[in-house]
Each structure stands twice: as C-alpha cells, then as structure tokens.
Image (spheres, rainbow, N blue to C red):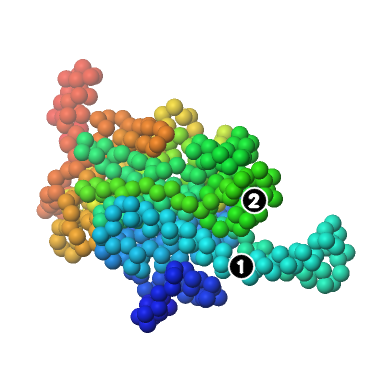
Amino acid sequence: MLLLQLQCLGYRPYNLCELAKLESHKLQHQSWTDDLPLCQMCGVGTAPNCVYGPDGKGTQSHPNEDGHLRFRGDDGCFLYGVFNGYDGSRVANFASQCLTAELLLGQLNSGHTDNDVRRILTQAFDVVEKSYFETIDDALAEKANLSNYLLPHNENVPFHQLSPQSQKVMERLKELEQEVSGGATVAVALILNNKLYIANVGTNRVLLCKSSSDGQNQVLQIGRPHSTDNEDELQRLAALGLDSARIRQAGQIAGQSSSRRLGDYRVKFNYNEIDVLSAAKSKPVVAEPEIHGGQSLEGVTGFLLLMSEGLINALESAHGPEQANQEIVAMVAAELAQQTSLEAVAQSVVDRVKRLHHDVFVSGRQRATYCSRHEDMTLLIRTLNYPLADAALTPTQGGRICPVSVPYSNSQSTSKTSVTLSLVMPSQSTLTNGTNTASTLEEGTPTPGSQSPTATLQSTNTQTQSSSSSSGDGSLFRQRGSQAAQPDETGRVPPYVDFSQFYRLWGSDHGDGQSMQGGLGPQ
C-alpha cells in the first residue's frame, strides 16, 4: 500500500528497496506488496522443522524460517518463489518482499526479450542483497564499536567475572548478533510471455514435469544446487584461491551447504576470518543468481515444483537421493488425481514426506540414522494446463479410473517398496459451474485440454538422465468413457469393469474349460 501511495504522488526511488531502510520497523505489520493479487493457479504446502526423541515424538527446535511468494502481475506475468532461511527468518522475509517489489511493479512487460528478463532478474537480486545490508548497517556499526570496547580487556574472562558494565555490553552484543545474523537461499520462477525463467541462489530445487506427445512424463530439474559438491561452484571457488578439495570434504561453508546465498554478513564481510575461506582473493560466497530461460510453455501440460532444501533433504534422508525427483513428482500426480484444490495437493505431499521421514526414523532401518531431524519444508506447485480432480465426480460419473503403480522406489533399492494406488481422476474437461472447460495456463485464457501423466518418468538435468517405469503397458492413467452409468430400478449401478477376458484366461490356464457361465465369475 505504501509503495502504491508514493507512486501515485510521483515518487520513484532509485530502487524500490530503498524503502526497506525507511520502513524497516513496519516490516512485521505490513507488506510492501499487500495489494498485488495472488496467483490462483498454484498451491503451497509447509511443515515446520522437527527433532525426534527416542520415543519417536517430534518437537520443533526453532520458529519456521522458510518463506514463499506467489503473485500475478500485469501483462500475463506471474512470479513464484521459495526461500529457505537460516539463523532466523529476517532475510527470507525481506527478500520475498523486496524481490516482488523489484520485479512486479512495472519493471517487466511483454515487450522484453529473454536477455532483458535475465538482466532484470540479476539486477533485482543485486538490489535485494545491497538493500538488506543497508537495513542492518546501524546494527553492524554498533556491534563493531561494542566489540572494540569489550574484547581488548575481557577476551577470555568468564561472563560471571565481568564487571556489570561489561555484562551489559555482552548482552547487547548477543542481541545485535541475533538481529544481523542469518541468510537465505532462493529459488524464483517467473512466467512472462508464456515463457518460464528460473533464478536460483543456493540449494533449493526446481522441477518441471511435462507430459510428452508419446504419453510419458518428462521430469526436468532446472539447474543444480549451489552446494559444496557442485563441480562448477568448486571450480569458481578454486579460481579465487581456495582449496576446493577441502571445501568438498567439509561439506559446509560457515555452517551451511550452500556456496551462494542472500545475506549472511559473516561470509560476505568477514570471510577472511573463516578458516576455509580465509585465502580467498575476493568475496567467495555470492548472491548472484544462476538464471535459466526463457523456456516456452506453449502447449505444455504438466506442473512446476519449487521445493525448499528442507523438503528435499527430508525425502533424500528417508529414501536416498537416487529417485527423489521421480518420487516427489509421483506424489504430486497422485494427489492431483484426488484433491480438489492445489493448496490441498501441496499440503498433502508435504505431509506425506513428513510421515515417510518419521516412519523411517522409528523403523530403526538402515537409513534411520539420517532421519533424526528435518528442517522446515516448503513446496509450491504451479499447474500448467493440468486439471484437478472433481470431488463430486465418481467412477460412474465419467471420471478416469486410475489403477496406477506409482514409481516411488528405485527398483534396485531394498529400503523402499512400490506402492499401488487406485485413483479416480476427472475427465480431460473438468466441470466448472455446469460448463465443461479446460484447465488454463494463464488465468482467463482457455487452452486445449490436458494430458494425464503416465507411469514412465524421465528425469534429466545437466548431469544425469534416468527413468523408471511401472509394470504393465506403461500407462499410468487410463481414461474411460465420459458417459455416466445410470442406476437400475433397484437403485444399483451396474458393474463398470468387465472381467470376462480374465475369466476366460483363468479357465484356459487351468485347463478346465470353464467359462463365465461355467461357474467362474458372477452368476
């Protein structure tokens, strides 16, 4: 509201995030972007962090630090983001509001080229980083002054032996450290001109699931996490004079696995005081996004997933990393077949991952040692021409019968089992207010009907490609006729599954010549 009022008065600062410093005391009470419409074609599911006790009961160890955004702008522009905060939620909250202000208040329009969009995204992240540090400038200066006063005289003195004045200084330093510490990793998806752009900083994950013309689902991981086992990132750090082998072995940089992040003044300003980073010629941990796109979404049927690091780690801890992408896509597809809202779909998937993680811990199996805790989890789902189930649509009312073998597990793994589900999905044209309409990519713009997923999932990224299939002919979803079965005079619905071929084959295999009329099957 504040931004819109100022714009109406003709005020336009050098960057909109300059308001952060002027209005930082209001951050907890109002959002800069509270007038932007939410996108109704996505859903978000969340779960707080959890630490399990010996009895299997979980407790939350700190307040939720994740964040997300999902806005619809002008010119058919949509913006989505998932933020994984750490050491507090301040950076994640600030970034979600500031990025939105830097991208959806007139900066983007349909006339922009791919290069324009990439440039604007890069600039937006740079503004967010600089503006955030402006908001903590005063606190950092005060912290430096108090440290200079305290440390020369009391560096190794126990707290209870400090003078009253020094104790007050120490307590104030702790408050300031809590105020300025913390950072966030970010995954942002932008849809403009029916093209998809991804901007990633850190270790969140983005998946695009597309139904191909041959009836298969292709699962694309867009980009790789900026982590200590990313070869490109290790080469970048090595070029700065750092020991990449040592960083890989440590697995973390200043307590986090990410090599790129927003905020975190310690690794941005004091990196020469951190042992593993001390030899760097320049700032090693950066907030520069890796940008992919634009990728055309014309004619695409499927869904987009943005996942926080906590969700990914929980699933990989429980089942291993080999098939995590296929598993999460299969879960989403199964829930889309049953739920009637995207919010319910996203929350059900997060709840399922949370249960899997907990069940592995209490089972005492091999992977239980990896599942003693999990961090905050966030999943954002954006559908692309993909229909939701209709709760009022039963199998006898034109729904799709979906006996599926969901590829939740790697066939070579013994720690997981394949789960067979019996689902009901709506027909390709969903019933809305008495009218058959297709799902849409852009709100208010009809597009052709969608295609259901199949059991074969092809997962690809810049490094690997793998696939998994269910048994049978490879068809995950089967569609039956749209003609609803009518009840007879007794009020019963006649059977809609024909077992005659099964009975003939059974009789043939057993060599007794029996037919359906000969004793097998319903009489």
Q: Is residue 358 visible?
A: no
Q: Which mark is residue 82?
A: none
First in sequence, mark 1 or 2: give its number. Answer: 1
Residue 239 lies left or right of residue 118; in this view the side is right
Image-based side of 479 in relation to 458, left or right: left
Question: Looking at the picture, which amino acid does disc 1 mark?
Answer: Asp
Residue with the mark numbered 2? 271
Instruction: Using residue 455 as the reference point, say whether residue 356 is left or right of it.
Output: right
Percent from the top left, x then y, of residue 49?
A: 55, 54
Task: Give x and y (percent) for residue 358.
Answer: 53, 46
Q: Considering depth in this image, is 39 or 139 the residue closer to the camera? A: 139
Report the residue marked by disc 1: 137
Residue 367 quadrant: top right
Q: Nearer the viewer, residue 143 or 308?
A: 143
Residue displayed at 27% across by 30% down: 472
The x, y position of residue 220, in whole percent, is 35, 41
